[in-house]
Image: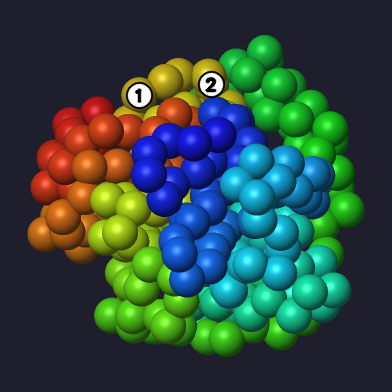
């Protein structure tokens, strides 16, 4: 789905990932679930492009609902995968600490896990090899994505700032639709390793220039990054 010039979303408000289309090729931000591979093919076809036009995949963190088709893209098509060094092991092995679920409602929770099953979420292939990145890196990929470390949801959670797309991709640093309660609007994300650290990390994007805040779960949010931390910390 096209959101704006250069900017497309794959998936929906339950699980989403993103495509940045430029004259120099395509950069993907996150890889959703394995079943989003078909969504990717459809979106590429609508642009008159193919997988061969993808220059790189940047992961906001290493959780299974963000790395879905990453290894397929890497191993079958040679597309490099980039992830923060602190989350490289998580993307490679799936190991993560157990976190309290917090509030939930049966309907939204069942919808979330049902969607995971429908998109082959139990068949995720972990990422065998990835290029490790760090806070402040600017990647040599279409759109020149820059890495902003946002630890909290996981140690290596990052935001990805792409000025060409007027967007900051935040992964699970926040959510605009809580997958366990169904509550919509900007708020902290569930399954977070360290909630206090995650909230503090929101200040790290405050100085960025963008009109889109794009989470891995929930609707795109049109706002200034400067407003993000203040809005969510009030909740």
**Closer to the camera, 89 or 135?**
135
Q: Is residue 66 visible?
A: yes
Give neighbour class at mark 1: few <14, some 14-19, many 20+ (Cα, 10 Å). Answer: some
**Residue that badge 2 annotates:** 181
**Residue that badge 1 annotates:** 185
Q: Total number of numbered labels?
A: 2
Q: Position of residue 211 (x, y in %)?
A: 22, 42
Position of 202 with respect to 149 (left or right) is left
Position of 40 with respect to 29 (left or right) is right
Which residue is drawn at the image coordinates 53% and 19% (left, top)? 182
**Residue 157 bears which disc, if any?**
none
**Closer to the camera, 198 or 228?**
228
Which residue is drawn at the image coordinates 12% and 47% (left, top)? 226
| Quadrant of res 149 | bottom left
SS at circle 1: strand
Q: Position of residue 31 (x, y in %)?
A: 65, 56
Give neighbour class at mark 2: few <14, some 14-19, many 20+ (Cα, 10 Å). Answer: some
């Amino acid at each position: 789905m096209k959101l704006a010039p250069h900017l497309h979303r794959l998936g929906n408000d339950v699980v989403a990932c993103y495509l940045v289309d430029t004259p120099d090729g395509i950069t993907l931000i996150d890889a959703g679930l394995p079943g989003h591979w078909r969504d990717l093919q459809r979106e590429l076809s609508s642009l008159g492009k193919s997988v061969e036009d993808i220059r790189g995949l940047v992961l906001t963190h290493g959780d299974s609902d963000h790395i879905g088709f990453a290894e397929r893209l890497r191993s079958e098509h040679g597309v490099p995968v980039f992830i923060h060094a602190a989350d490289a092991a998580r993307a490679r092995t799936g190991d993560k600490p157990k976190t309290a679920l917090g509030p939930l409602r049966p309907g939204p929770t069942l919808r979330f896990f049902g969607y995971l099953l429908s998109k082959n979420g139990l068949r995720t292939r972990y990422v065998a090899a990835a290029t490790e990145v760090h806070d402040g890196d600017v990647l040599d990929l279409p759109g020149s994505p820059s890495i902003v470390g946002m630890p909290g949801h996981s140690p290596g959670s990052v935001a990805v700032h792409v000025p060409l797309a007027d967007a900051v991709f935040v992964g699970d640093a926040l959510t605009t639709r809580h997958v366990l309660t169904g509550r919509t609007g900007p708020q902290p994300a569930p399954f977070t390793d360290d909630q206090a650290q995650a909230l503090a990390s929101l200040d790290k994007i405050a100085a960025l220039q963008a009109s889109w805040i794009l989470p891995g779960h929930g609707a795109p949010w049109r706002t200034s990054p400067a407003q993000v931390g203040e809005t969510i910390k009030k909740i």
